Image (cartoon, helix red, strand yellow):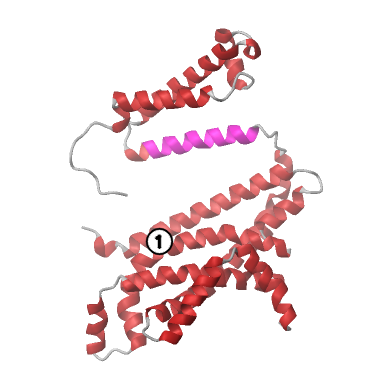
Amino acid sequence: MLYQDTVESEVLVHKPWFVASIFALVLALFLTINLTGTVMGEVMRPVIGDPLESGFYGRFAIAFVIAVMFCLNLVLIGFGPLIVQIVVVWLELLVLFIGFFNLFNLSLPFIWDNLPLLISQGVFTTLYVSAISLLFASMIAIVAAIAKLSTNGFAYGIASFYTSFFRGLPLLMQIYLVYLGLPQLGIVIDAVPSGILALSLCIGAYMTEIFRSGIASIDRGQWEASRSMGFGFGLTMRRIVLPQALPVIIPPTGNMFIGMLKDSSLVSVLGVWELTFLARTIGQPTFHHMEMLIAAAIIYWILSVCLEMIQGRIERHYARSKVR
């Protein structure tokens, strides 16, 4: 978040030109959408008459009401403190999402009956694959980052080729190459290790640049000072460079782990019983696809929110030295 502005100024959402611009934008947007056949059409029936026969007047009336409600909501939220604004916006968006999902006529008993299996088997496998992959990816990234920062041409060449190759191929293709290609070389591994290996190699290539930029952000004088005190390479990296680079490395690394949590769904093509595979398998026989997919999506979202909170706490811990 940006530093709090010390200059007193009018709140943006209370400026007439801004409210008028948002009103015109929302009005134009909903004029392009025919909502006369929806719940809004029935709500507006006393004003527009039969929604299906109201024509342009009905569409304009519905769009006008939505634009007024949106702008009024925007202005009223602007009077509250920041935390209240955030909570209100989240609650409003949750209500809209619940209303949207309700349009699918979901079978809630079917979801509740299969939710324990999704959590016990799917979530466990997803977290297991993601965590192990992140561990191996971090180990690969540290080695590759040091190689890309070295003056050794052989090490730099290997590291740069590795990052270029694995960042240049789609993750799904890498999973297939590992699972189907290695057996042709006489190396047969199961689906879960294949998925972990593919994820580690792919994410490790991206994390290499994260670690490289974090290490490179430390002033060269830190390195020279530690070396002049007789510190070896390993001790310098472990005690001097990496502790200072962690505040730079952690935010993008946390984002990579959250991304990996969702990328792990690709190993479902190998028959791994992770969250996406179970959601598709459970819903397919009875044609309850949307129930299971939406349930899996909500679980993914909850896991991501939990990881975001953990990431935030870690970032605040390492940012204590920068607090003014």
Q: Residue at x 44, y 59 (%)?
A: 310
Specify few, some or many for label 1: CA neighbours under 10 Å numbering under 14, 14-19, or 20 or more.
Answer: some
Q: Amino acid at mark 1?
A: Pro
Q: Residue at x 52, y 37 (%)?
A: 94
Compare residues 139 and 168 and report the one nearer the observer.
Answer: 168
Which range is magenta? 85-102
Is 6 drawn above or below residue 69 in the view shown? below
Question: Magenta segment: does it hold 106?
Answer: no
Q: Which residue is mark 1?
A: 251
Residue 100 is situated, as x and y percent measured from the top left of the image, at 60, 34
| Front residue of this view, candidates 212 and 167 | 167
Is 95 part of what is drawn in magenta? yes
**Image location (x, y in percent) of residue 212:** 39, 72
Of all residues shown, which one is farthest toward the bottom?
Answer: 230
Q: Report whether 134 appears left or right of 275.
A: left
Residue 79 found in image quarter? top left
**Measured from the top left, where is residue 3 in percent x and y?**
25, 49
From the top left corner, tell me how far across and down residue 56 is, in percent: 56, 14
Quadrant housing residue 262: bottom right
Left or right of 102 on screen, residue 17: left
- Residue for point 35% across, 75% down: 242
Q: Determine whether 314 is above or below 211 in the image.
A: above
Which residue does the image show at 71% across and 61% down from the upper left? 269
Secondary element at image label 1? helix
Q: Camera-side residue: 14 or 82? A: 14
Q: Does 74 sit left or right of 306 as displayed? A: left
User: Split into 4 quadrants, where in the image is the C terminus?
Assistant: bottom left
* Residue 13, quarter of picture: top left
